[in-house]
Image (cartoon, grey):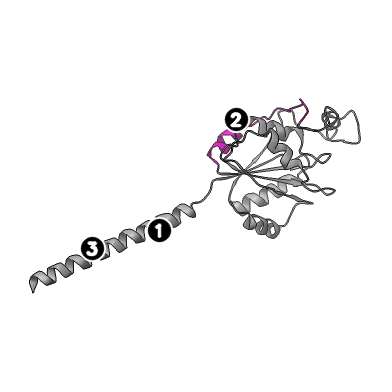
Amino acid sequence: MKTYRTKMLRLVSMALASALVFSLANVQNVEAKTKKKNIVVLYFSATGTTRGAAKKIGKATKGNVIEIKAKKPYTEEDLDYGDENSRVSKEHASAKTPARSKVRPKIANITAIKKAVKKADVVYIGYPIWWGEAPHIVYSLVENVSLKKKTVIPFSTSISSGLGSSGKHLKVKAQISSKTKWMKGRNFYDVPSQKTVNKWVKSLKY
């Protein structure tokens, strides 16, 4: 009788141990799948609109928001696209598209950006739309910061046009790999509401 009870206790103990191991394995799998991603929101903003959108995205994702700062800041005169001699007009006239241009404004905080992106899993890149494209300084970013093995999400701000092909053109010049997930992105026609941003971020699958 004692032998039978001993065997039963052993079997029950083994079953409980197996169940515990299985349960722990499931918990670990769930934790791996739901592991919090390291998110960085990079943005270039000339007038403040893109900055506003970036901060809303940062709040929605709990990401690290970093401004792309031009080493030579753009002045109000520089941004006068109606003046063919202004800085932005000359950048635009340098080639048919920014991707083909040799103009690459230097980024003052490029080292800090590289460090942040290196640790990130997801990188949002925001910019205003100039002549249907991302500004030249955003090309300075993607050409000099490794986006290999990252999920990249472009977003733009423009009251007159959408994201267009600007994201695709950046992708062509970017430092990426076969493991880079470059997503479609979207445009905001003004500083979006937090509700709008939350809904968009939630819809993204990364």
Please name the amino acid that badge 2 sits on.
Answer: Thr
Nearest to viewer (mark 2 / mark 3): 3
Look at mark 2 in the image and give the residue it sits on.
111
Please name the amino acid that badge 3 sits on.
Answer: Met
User: Furthest residue to the bottom?
Assistant: 1
Residue 205: percent from left, percent from top = 60, 54
Camera-nearest residue between 176 and 197: 176
Magenta extent: 100-120
Disc 3 to disc 1: CB gap under 8 Å:
no
Camera-nearest residue between 95 and 172: 172
Look at mark 1 in the image and give the residue it sits on.
27
Please name the amino acid that badge 1 sits on.
Answer: Val
Identify the residue shown where x is 62% and y is 57%.
Answer: 202
Residue at disc 3, secondary structure? helix
Crowding at label 2, few (<14), some or many (≥20) Cα neighbours within 10 Å? Answer: few
Look at mark 3 in the image and give the residue it sits on.
14
User: Furthest residue to the top?
Assistant: 102
Residue 41: percent from left, percent from top = 63, 44
